[in-house]
Image (spheres, rainbow, N blue to C red):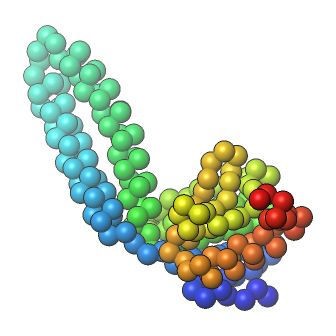
């Protein structure tokens, strides 16, 4: 049985090691993304009303072309909203959950039934280390750096890194990377 590390909860099962990390919310960024999402919803509604009332029901000669332009804009606007929603969920989450086994590493930031989830193939995950820039546990996935547990203390982060590297990267020697 693996022991908990400070505020970090570790639950071992036959399939996964579940690691629950506390997250300190950045209220300023959460407020900014909340306002941006409200603006996105209002503008989406306004453009749908415009599309129906002023384009489709107008019967004007240029209605088809204007309608195509508005629909194209709505498609692009949808992807902007999707990106905003993911960032909002990232900053709204109160905890970070890692599910890790020999094949896969999943990072989940739940917000009620919503939340962002990232999955990584363990064959491409490099061992965990401490990010000097962000002062949090980090791992490399290909050329991408993935940061987690940004609100952990130095001792909690070091113990988590040591535990995860011991369990999933047994042949790894941190001194060889230096």
Name the one closer to the observer, 4 or 18: 4
- Left-right relation of 177 to 18: right
Query: Which residue is at 40% across, 72% downward?
Result: 25
Image-quadrant location for residue 120 = bottom right
Image-quadrant location for residue 166 = bottom right
Name the one closer to the observer, 66 or 131: 131
Query: Which residue is at 42% across, 61% downward?
Result: 89
Image-quadrant location for residue 104 = bottom right
Q: Quadrant of the N terminus?
A: bottom right
Query: Which residue is at 20% across, 43% downward?
Result: 43
Name the one closer to the observer, 132 or 60: 132
Residue 40: x percent and y percent?
26, 47
Residue 145: x percent and y percent?
61, 53
Q: Is residue 108 visible?
A: no
Query: Which residue is at 65% across, 86% downward?
Result: 5
- Left-right relation of 123 to 119: right
Residue 49 sits above or below residue 124 on the image: above
User: Residue most toward the top?
Assistant: 61
Q: Quadrant of the C terminus?
A: bottom right
Residue 137: x percent and y percent?
62, 67
Residue 166 sits above or below residue 53 on the image: below
Q: How many tags in the picture?
A: 0
User: Residue most toward the front?
Assistant: 178
Residue 134 sits above or below residue 39 on the image: below
Q: Is residue 140 visible?
A: yes
Residue 117: x percent and y percent?
56, 58
């Amino acid at each position: 049985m693996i022991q908990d590390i400070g505020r970090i909860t570790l639950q071992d099962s036959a399939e996964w090691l579940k690691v629950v990390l506390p997250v300190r919310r950045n209220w300023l960024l959460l407020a900014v993304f909340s306002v941006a999402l409200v603006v996105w919803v209002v503008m989406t509604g306004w453009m749908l009303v415009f599309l129906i009332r002023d384009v489709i029901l107008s019967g004007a000669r240029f209605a088809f072309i204007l309608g195509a332009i508005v629909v194209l804009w709505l498609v692009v606007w949808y992807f902007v909203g999707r990106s905003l929603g993911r960032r909002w969920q990232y900053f709204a989450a109160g905890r970070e959950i890692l599910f890790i086994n020999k094949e896969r590493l999943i990072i989940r930031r739940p917000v009620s039934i919503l939340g962002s989830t990232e999955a990584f193939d363990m064959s491409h995950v490099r061992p965990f280390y401490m990010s000097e820039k962000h002062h949090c546990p980090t791992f490399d996935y290909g050329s991408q750096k993935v940061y987690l547990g940004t609100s952990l203390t130095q001792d909690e982060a070091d113990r988590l890194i040591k535990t995860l590297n011991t369990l999933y990267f047994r042949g790894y020697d941190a001194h060889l990377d230096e």
